[in-house]
Amino acid sequence: MQRRTKIIATIGPASDSERTLKELVAAGMNVARLGLAHGTLDEALERYRRIRKVSKDMGTRVGILVDLPGPKIRSAPFPEDGSNLSAGSSIRLVPGKNSSTETVVEVDYEKVLEDILPGDVLPFGDGQVVVCVETVDRNGASATVTNGGILHGRPGIRIPSERLSLPTPTDDDLQKLDAFVEAGVDMVAVSYVRSAHDVRRVGTEPHPRGPLVVAKIETRAAVENLSGIIEASAAIMVARGDLGTECDIAELPHLQKKIIAECIAAGLPVITATQMLESMIQNSSPTRAEASDVANAVFDGTSAVMLSGETAIGNHPVESVEVMARIAKQADQEFDYGRWAERVAELRSESENELNNGSSQAITDAMTLATWRAANELDLEALVCISGSGFTVRSMARFRPNVSILGMTMDERTAQQLTLSWGVTPFCIESAMGYEERIANAIATAKNEGILKSNDLIGVLAGITGDSPATDVLRIMRIA
């Protein structure tokens, strides 16, 4: 069995050369992530163009996800060799952007003293240093270091999301996004989402005309407003780094499972991210706990697993993708396909009061479940899913059929966006007006690629009702 869980690799200084990008693709990278919080816009656009070139040269489809910085609050720079904020020591937080020390931390946000209160717990970075605010006055805030450590560069400072004045996405986010929309980017991740309103503020055209919008769940408010955010988004990322600083660490694994389950129920791709193989930033192999973490995310039903610093700045970017691919492939083989569809059906039934009988979603639910049963009972060679927007393909992927899913679309952007979907091999086929012509084009494409051959028994899933987006036709056929 081929690996079916997708891999997202963050591209940075350690991985942005043409040679390394080719090695990452060969190792198993399905989607390249460009984080816009570091470096210039021109540098990010140059990496974007380089990824496109490598993908074209290799004849391998690679999706590109840009990750907007969001309202990230950072300190002014610490000394080059770092500053040690020891546990129990007192520090002063003041607005500023010049420099920070172990006693006075300048915060590059002019409204910081308006947005924090005594008693607030403020993590730095991914939580390696934590301070508790004691008092706030017009000139600054006094705080006690509860978790000590050494800080370098300009670490982020986490202000409670419900009181942060900055909007999501920020004006700077939208300016950067405009440049990538013009370039034709496939997906965009929105940071620090707190409600569905934040997702709608992105303002791009609905996919596939615009990029697939990925909402990052990394705030307590996002967890509380999850159903609305899922409804407004095209995909979800479980961003465990920041989520783990805003929620109790013991709660985090359960939130991960809850978010993944709700995405599966809604038919949305879901990404599990942050510190998956963190030790491989320095080491050539992961810890046993990290290997288990990746496998368990697959067992939970995640569509994709993501590498961040491991590939962006780490010493072993290609090895990190290779290791993650091996772990995910083994987990895919051990996945409980037999019981998964029953779980999805149960998840859907829990929200069936939200579905109208005969609605597009209800019809698609019934058809994709029937297709899963047919694939199991008839031992099909593959499922050919034909879709203009990708809706049919993503709806089928959530049932985790134990056969190949060939995502056939007439839209190149849709094919690029399907690189994020579990188990899907996307293809762009020639446009055709008639249903029969589309099937013929899809089968011819799969035969030319060496995936299907004459006499193979396949399932063909599509929607042919012109006035409805529903997936309403399943055909079982043997290839001539």
Image (cartoon, grey):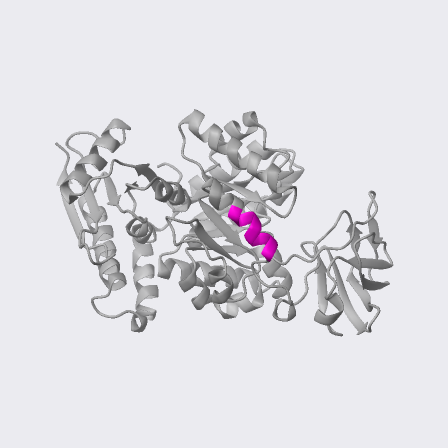
Q: Main secondary structure of the magenta part?
A: helix
Is 177 inside the magenta-drawn segment? yes
The residue lying toward the viewer, choosing from 202 and 461, is 202
Name the image quarter holding residue 117: bottom right
* Vertical order, 423 against 441 (above or below): below
Q: Residue at x 42, y 62 (%)?
A: 232
Q: Residue at x 23, y 29 (%)?
A: 447
Q: Name the quadrant of the N terminus.
A: top left
Q: Which residues are magenta?
A: 171-178
Q: Where is residue 202 drawn, in percent x and y? A: 49, 57
Name the image quarter holding residue 156: bottom right
Residue 296 shows in this picture? no
Q: Residue at x 33, y 55 (%)?
A: 340
Name the image quarter holding residue 137: bottom right
Q: Name the quadrant of the C terminus.
A: top left
Q: Is residue 92 left or right of residue 368?
A: right
Q: Where is residue 364 drawn, in percent x and y? A: 25, 58
